[in-house]
Image (cartoon, grey):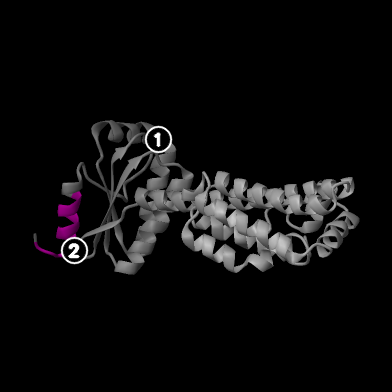
Amino acid sequence: MHYIQGEFNSLDEYKKAYFLSEEEIQLIRKRSQAIPFEDFQQTFDATMVWMREGELSDRFPEPIIQATIQARDFIITDSSLEVLGEGYLERHAGIRRQYLEAGVTLKAFTTLLVRFHESVYAVLQKHYPDDVQLAIACKKYNLIDLDILAKEYRKKTLQDLEEQNTALRELSTPVAQIWENILLLPLVGFIDSKRSKDIMEAMLDNIADKQAKFFILDISGVAIVDTAVANHLIKMTKAARLMGAKCIISGISGNIAQTIVELGIAIDEIETTGSMKDALKWAIKESGNQL
């Protein structure tokens, strides 16, 4: 199981945080065992009807409803007769991930869980209307189950953000092969240490994969060229040279050239051109290819 710092990562942690004792867990199990299983099945079936016909029915894909129905007895048992038994956290975390990955929203899933828990408790209350300790124990358990959902939702959100960030990083480093043995990477926006690392990794990976001999870095779209950015560019060209490729920096405007000179940055070993077109012409000529 994957552990997350700052989260509850075991049932013992949940039970301690919500002051749910082992005696209370056993009370729920004992009371449930004395109730006909059919009573729980009926309330489960009513919940399935709500998933299909309730106000949030459009949030529950039919495959999820079918999978839930197929697991009916397992879900009922895990939520009453063997509540919070061994492996509960892993099993129900997995169920929640399946729902969330199927596109069920947090609002819909939370409403479903609350309705189901309330209906299960209604069965218990029908048979034990005056058992205050049972009511308290059920409420604690319900809160834990909802917290498990909240944790999985946070994990799913972080996963989605990381995937989006990865996609954005790939979009921000669009390496293209524009000629035989010649690669181009147009840079746009700001370049910080993190993005510089991503750019260098993309550059070196593509040089290795395509056996490129020339790599054009076009910086005409870079917002600011300061000491840090210039140093990043120098590191990139040196890394490309170690891979056996010549790196050309294009898009050097008058302002950028003046900035680099004023910063006192030595670029004697770096090929530079004013435009991407000139860089391409130079690379083709140096490679021995013909236009």
Q: CA distance from mark 1 to mark 2?
A: 31 Å
**Mark 2, other Cα within 10 Å: few <14 / some 14–19 / many ≥20:** some
Return the residue at label 2. 287
Query: Magenta region: which residues?
Result: 279-290
Q: Name the one closer to the observer, 133 or 215.
A: 133
Looking at the image, residue 256 sits to the left or right of residue 280; the answer is: right
Under mark 1, the amino acid is: Asp
Q: Quadrant of residue 124?
A: bottom right
Under mark 2, the amino acid is: Ser
Q: Earlier in the sequence, mark 1 or mark 2?
A: 1
Return the residue at label 1. 226
What's the residue at 48%, 63% (across, down)?
63
Q: Which mark is residue 110?
A: none
What's the residue at 28%, 31% (across, down)?
255
Residue 59, image x and y in percent? 49, 49
Residue 240, image x and y in percent? 36, 59
Taking the magenta stretch, the answer to whether it contains residue 10 is no
Q: Is residue 219 above or below residue 37?
A: above
Looking at the image, residue 112 sits to the left or right of residue 242; the answer is: right
